[in-house]
Amino acid sequence: MMEVIAFYLFAFLTIAMFATTVLTNNALYALSSLAAGMIFISAFYFMLDAEFLGVVQIVVYTGAVMALYAFGMMFFDTIADVKEDIKHPKLVFLLSGGIALLVVVIFTAPIISGNIIAEHPMSPEYGNNVKDVGLVLFTKYLVPFELAAVMLLVAMIGGIILAGKKMDVSITQLSEEEIDKLSSNSEMTKDKK
Amino acid sequence: MMLNDYLILSTILFCIGLIGVIRRKNLLMLFFASEIMLNAVNVGLAAVSKFHGDLSGQMFAFFIIAVAASEVAIGLGLLILAYKRKNSLSLDNLQSMGG
């Protein structure tokens, strides 16, 4: 009984928060309602016995991703309302028709999926979700895990180079000759030392 | 709660994100909408993982979270560059090739 109440409460809250994110015209409201929705999403993970995933959701999404968005929004004009003009109302009708079709397909799909069984169940059953996740992650999914680590490193370097290097001149905006001039200047200063 | 309830919730959240992607003309809002879609899929994967007794669903959710984190890092860098160049984040202003 308690689980049913919790499910509907958090479902209502999550849908309300994400609908606010999608429909509001204020970037700050969108950001904060998105962060709240991420927290509410983690409640479902706790209900589904995926405690580790719930904690990761809170730490990574509301901790890291939202902080990154908040940091990024310092560069943009966030106080002003987001101006959007929709020029082709017919296209909107067409796309909402497509969404309706998608909804029908997804709602009927669970009927078919009722017959699916897991072929090679990977659940070691330590009775502790964190231990189970650790065991599976470092045996069956070791290579994807390390690839994800490399991907995060590449993303970090890419983010630093795109946004952070030489904030006043932004080398990605210069022409080739100007970049050559910059690098030769720095080499000359190195030689002098 | 049954698997279907979680899958229906996941569908609703995914459609909210999809509406956002279609309706929005601002790049930052498009990023928010794509985060919503990724989260919706994660809920579905965790639900399937529980009701089929298979941890693989949770593993995929972890990898999706890692992909989302790196997407945000790169995407925000590109957004800052686009804002420096065009002084706006609207999709209409990003068109640079006339055709």
Image (cartoon, coloured by chain):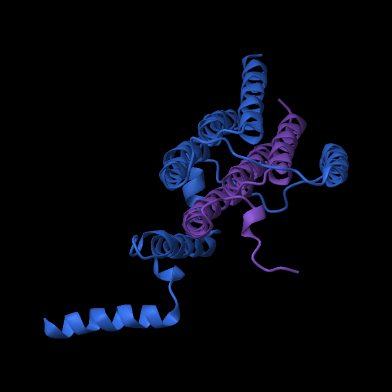
Chain colours: A blue, B purple
Number of numbered discs overlaid on the protein picture = 0
Residue in the foreground of this view, choosing between B45 and A182: A182
Above/below status of A170 relative to A70: below
Using the rendered view, name the quadrant where residue A170 is placed. Answer: bottom left
Above/below status of B89 relative to A93: below
Residue at screen point 75% across, 37% down? B11
Residue at screen point 84% across, 47% down? A91
Q: Is residue A24 left or right of residue A96?
A: left
Residue A124: x percent and y percent?
A: 55, 46
Above/below status of A124 relative to A4: below
Q: Residue furthest left?
A: A193
Residue A176: x percent and y percent?
A: 44, 81
Residue B71: x percent and y percent?
A: 53, 55
Residue B36: x percent and y percent?
A: 62, 40
Residue in the foreground of this view, choosing between A72 and A127: A72
Q: Is residue B98 left or right of residue A175?
A: right
Q: Is residue A144 left or right of residue B91?
A: left
Residue at screen point 67% across, 42% down? A84
Quarter holding the C terminus of chain B is bottom right
Quarter holding the N terminus of chain B is top right
Q: Is residue A122 visible?
A: no
Q: Is residue A165 visible?
A: yes
Residue in the foreground of this view, choosing between B23 and B54: B23
